[in-house]
Image (cartoon, grey):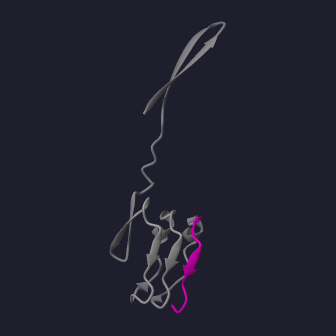
Amino acid sequence: MKRLLLIVLPIGLFVFSCEEEQSEDIPTEVTLWGVVYSVENTTEINLGGSGLTGEIPSEIGNLTNLTFLSLGDNQLTGSIPSEIGNLTNLTYLNLSSN
């Protein structure tokens, strides 16, 4: 979207055109273990005991509306991704027994 900014000074009229920067880095969907989740609508993920392997994908941090995340009782390895810190609405997290 283009915006125009008019500035009137005693010495003249100045017009500036500003383009709003749309970040294409913000996804609308995230794929975790072959399942596609909506960034906007996903509030709960319960994959406890689902036989998941490997590391927790860093993309999980894009699901900022998550309030409940259960990944316990799987075979997940590696470190907890720092992007988990983006989940500021999270009230329940279970990563036990991995």
Q: Magenta span has 56? A: no
Query: Residue 56: x and y, percent?
Result: 47, 78
Magenta part of the chain: 88-98
Using the image as rendered, state which of residue 23 and residue 49 is in the foreground: 49
Left or right of 89? Residue 43 is left
Query: Residue 10: x and y, percent?
Result: 66, 7
Using the image as rendered, state which of residue 98 and residue 79 is in the foreground: 98
Q: Residue at x 40, y 86 (%)?
A: 52
Q: Residue at x 51, y 63 (%)?
A: 65
Total labels: the figure holds 0
Query: Residue 13: x and y, percent?
Result: 57, 10
Q: Residue 79's quadrant in the figure?
A: bottom right
Left or right of 28? Residue 90 is right
Using the image as rendered, state which of residue 43 and residue 34 is in the foreground: 43
Q: Is residue 35 above or below residue 18?
A: below
Q: Is residue 65 above or below residue 32?
A: above
Q: Magenta span has 93? A: yes
Query: Residue 16: x and y, percent?
Result: 52, 22
- Farthest-out residue, top: 11
Q: Is residue 11 above or below residue 19?
A: above
Secondary structure character of the magenta stretch overall: loop
Q: Quadrant of the N terminus?
A: top left
Q: Residue at x 49, y 70 (%)?
A: 58
